[in-house]
Image (cartoon, rainbow, N blue to C red):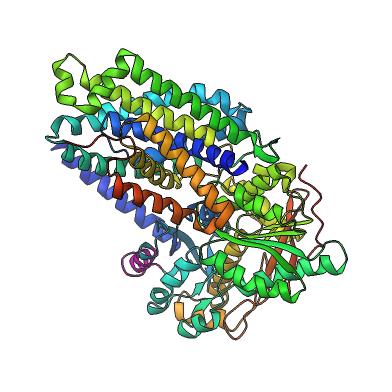
């Protein structure tokens, strides 16, 4: 039982890491390799507000979300929209986006180095244990899990209930046909991308309460997010959540019952199995 | 037309400026290569880069290096190697051939130093390493006679842990149960391999032993596993992110041990900053003679000039390695690399870390192995022959 809860908490962390990329890749079709840097920047902001102004990360995220939204909107409109416009096929857009955002990730690392320095940053927030069913858990991880549930739930509802959400899903399925039914594709793609960035930055702020980050760690999170998004199925909120939880529980099971040294191996074994037997991901649609 | 005239004018102005500068003082080009990005950047920006800046500032502030009556200002040429050994090699090569650097400061961290050693050797640069920890010193120094080691070796660091814990056990302060974990990466594996026999030799029983992959995001299974084994001491041969992570998890789990040791980055000011009073009496790799006025003066200057605090292990040694180079240049009155290298080999040096002398393998055999956070200062508690060690304290809870 303890293992299951620890695993679910870790899964919540993973969901926070991956959800933003899912929106950006699944909905606005930008494979954003600078995603991890946005996450680290969110963590930096939380760290800075906490150490300089004692502002709780739980409040910081309300400042951070609109800010990250605006920054990502700008990035999309200035840097990525020209790629979308000139791309003739989805494949071409993917290649262009990967190269561009790869470059952007270096720029982001450089900017963070220049503004915050390259030191590790770590602080103690809500680092208090709670005990239930005979095991102890850190409050900050539980908070992150709750936030992940709220964010993912809200996104799911929004994507399935609201008009804008459904339009975005239509774009994810077929950008060309959605235009025919009167959906403003460029605007909503930008919206999805910016929203993805905001979710990632908020995730970074929450994660920074228990993980130690530095300006160069972004790539680790990009990779993790990529694995989870692909496992869950591109463009599906449920898929990302399920894949994140699955990964968290699996890693914790292996760490507690077999050996912590095998967690990575187990995670990638799961990844390979899913790619072999369900290449479109757990909840993904087959590409026509 | 006007534009061209302006260009000509500014060009001649620049020329005039450079001429006047070179007339005022000679400059010595010093190369510096290290990570500003990539996996080891977090360590290098604490221990390495600020010291490059501080050293250049110190030397130039007192009018430059005195080489036989001529003053040489130092000019630093910096390269980011992205924590990539291939880039380190390229950068050193570029410094040697394109920039024509007079001297090159040793790169940061063990792997990058070993990668760059052949290039230093080929161009005859003395290479005084400050952050290379290896047990292959003998082999390396016979292959690269200009390579020097200052920070110690893996066996010594591991033995230090066994000695400190052993003394606690002999005093009856702790029992003989040790939980030992390590990060599954070169440094962590090597230290764990050395520490296991050393701990057994000291009469300890290793009740929990495991490794975890680099970059593990949830270390609670590791700490829970250790806690279940009910140890008296917890030893982790860890890297920076997990050094922080394990400590936080130990606080959450209230890991009840009398000795708690984490390895790399325990000596970083950020460690105390992140953990507050929970950091008190935590043991870690490295250490300095923190009560030494020379070190305290260095700490003060470091913070004034760079705006950052130095760490309590490698920072001082990085600066000391630059001092060795500086003293060798001034003592020989020469900027000939061969002459300077010859002098380094056959002399001792007084640095802020104390006296540095070489054994037959160009190795500084007296180094700090274990330190401990005591009331906000990380003090050396064990060494292989340095002065100023304080006695270690027991870890009493995490409040």
At x 37%, y 49%, the residue is A271
| Residue in the foreground of this view, choosing between A27 and B385 | A27
| Residue in the foreground of this view, choosing between A281 and B280 | A281
For residue A53, side relative to residue A119 (left or right)? right
Magenta span has B97? yes
Q: Position of residue A81 (x, y in %)?
A: 22, 29
Magenta span has B239? no
Q: Position of residue B310 (x, y in %)?
A: 62, 53
| Residue in the foreground of this view, choosing between A181 and A38 | A181
Q: Which residues are magenta?
A: B88-101
At x 51%, y 66%, the residue is B186
- From the image, which quarter does the N terminus of chain B lie in? top left
- From the image, which quarter does the C terminus of chain B lie in? top right
- Considering the whole magenta stretch, tell me its main secondary structure: helix
Q: Is residue B153 visible?
A: no
For residue A240, side relative to residue B51 (left or right)? left
Q: Is residue A30 above or below residue B86?
A: above
At x 55%, y 28%, the residue is A146
Residue furthest to the right in view is B172
Q: Is residue B135 above or below residue A61?
A: below
Q: Is residue B25 above or below residue B217?
A: below
Q: Position of residue B226 (x, y in %)?
A: 68, 55
């Amino acid at each position: 039982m303890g293992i299951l809860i620890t695993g679910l908490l870790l899964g919540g962390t993973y969901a926070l890491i991956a959800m933003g990329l899912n929106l950006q890749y699944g909905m606005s079709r930008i494979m954003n390799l600078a995603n991890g840097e946005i996450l680290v920047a969110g963590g930096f902001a939380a760290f800075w507000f906490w150490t300089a102004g004692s502002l709780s990360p739980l409040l910081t995220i309300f400042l951070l979300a609109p800010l990250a939204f605006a920054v990502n909107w700008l990035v999309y409109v200035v840097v990525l929209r020209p790629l979308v416009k000139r791309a003739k096929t989805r494949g071409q857009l993917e290649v262009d986006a990967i190269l561009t955002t790869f470059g952007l990730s270096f720029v982001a690392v450089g900017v963070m180095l220049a503004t915050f320095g390259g030191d590790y940053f770590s602080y103690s927030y809500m680092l208090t244990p709670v005990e239930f069913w005979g095991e102890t858990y850190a409050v900050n991880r539980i908070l992150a899990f709750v936030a992940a549930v709220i964010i993912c739930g809200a996104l799911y509802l929004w994507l399935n209930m609201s008009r804008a959400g459904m339009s975005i899903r239509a774009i994810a399925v077929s950008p060309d046909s959605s235009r025919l039914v009167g959906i403003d594709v460029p605007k909503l793609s930008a919206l999805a991308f910016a929203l993805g960035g905001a979710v990632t930055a908020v995730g970074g702020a929450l994660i920074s309460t228990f993980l130690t980050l530095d300006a160069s760690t972004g790539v680790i999170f990009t990779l993790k997010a990529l694995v989870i998004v692909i496992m869950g199925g591109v463009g599906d909120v449920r898929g990302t959540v399920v894949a994140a939880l699955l990964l968290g529980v699996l890693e914790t099971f292996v760490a507690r019952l077999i050996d912590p040294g095998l967690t990575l191996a187990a995670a990638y074994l799961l990844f390979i199995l899913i790619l072999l037997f369900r290449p479109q991901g757990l909840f993904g649609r087959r590409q026509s | 037309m006007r534009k061209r005239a302006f260009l000509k004018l500014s060009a001649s102005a620049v020329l005039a400026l450079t001429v006047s500068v070179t007339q005022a003082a000679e400059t010595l080009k010093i190369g510096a290569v290290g990570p500003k990005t990539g996996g080891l950047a977090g360590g290098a920006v604490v221990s390495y880069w600020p010291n490059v800046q501080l050293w250049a500032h110190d030397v130039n502030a007192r009018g430059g290096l005195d080489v036989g009556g001529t003053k040489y200002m130092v000019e630093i040429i910096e390269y980011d190697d992205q924590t990539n050994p291939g880039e380190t090699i390229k950068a050193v090569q570029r410094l040697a051939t394109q920039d024509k650097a007079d001297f090159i400061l040793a790169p940061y961290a063990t792997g990058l130093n070993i990668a760059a050693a052949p290039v230093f050797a080929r161009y005859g640069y003395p290479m005084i390493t400050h952050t290379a920890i290896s047990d292959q010193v003998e082999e390396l120094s016979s292959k690269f006679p200009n390579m020097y080691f200052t920070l110690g070796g893996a066996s010594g660091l591991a033995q230090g842990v066994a000695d400190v814990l052993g003394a606690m056990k002999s005093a009856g302060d702790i029992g003989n149960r040790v939980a030992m974990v390590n990060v599954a990466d070169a440094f962590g594996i090597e230290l764990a391999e050395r520490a296991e026999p050393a701990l057994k030799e000291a009469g300890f029983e290793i009740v929990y032993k495991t490794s975890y992959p680099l970059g593990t995001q949830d270390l609670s299974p590791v700490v829970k596993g250790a806690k279940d084994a009910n140890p008296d001491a917890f030893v982790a041969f860890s890297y920076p992110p997990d050094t922080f992570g394990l400590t936080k998890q130990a606080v959450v789990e209230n890991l009840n041990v009398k000795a708690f040791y984490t390895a790399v980055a325990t000596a970083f000011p950020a460690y105390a900053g992140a953990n507050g009073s929970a950091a008190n009496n935590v043991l870690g790799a490295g250490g300095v003679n923190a009560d030494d006025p020379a070190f305290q003066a260095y700490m003060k200057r470091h913070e004034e000039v760079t705006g950052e605090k130095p760490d309590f292990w490698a920072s001082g040694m990085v600066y000391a390695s630059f001092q060795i180079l500086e003293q060798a240049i001034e003592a020989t009155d020469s900027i000939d690399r061969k002459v300077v290298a010859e002098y380094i080999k056959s002399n001792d040096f007084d640095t802020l870390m104390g006296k540095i002398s070489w054994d037959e393998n160009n190795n500084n055999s007296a180094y700090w192995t274990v330190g401990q956070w005591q009331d906000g200062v990380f003090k050396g508690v064990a060494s292989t022959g340095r002065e100023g060690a304080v006695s270690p304290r027991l870890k009493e809870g995490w409040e």
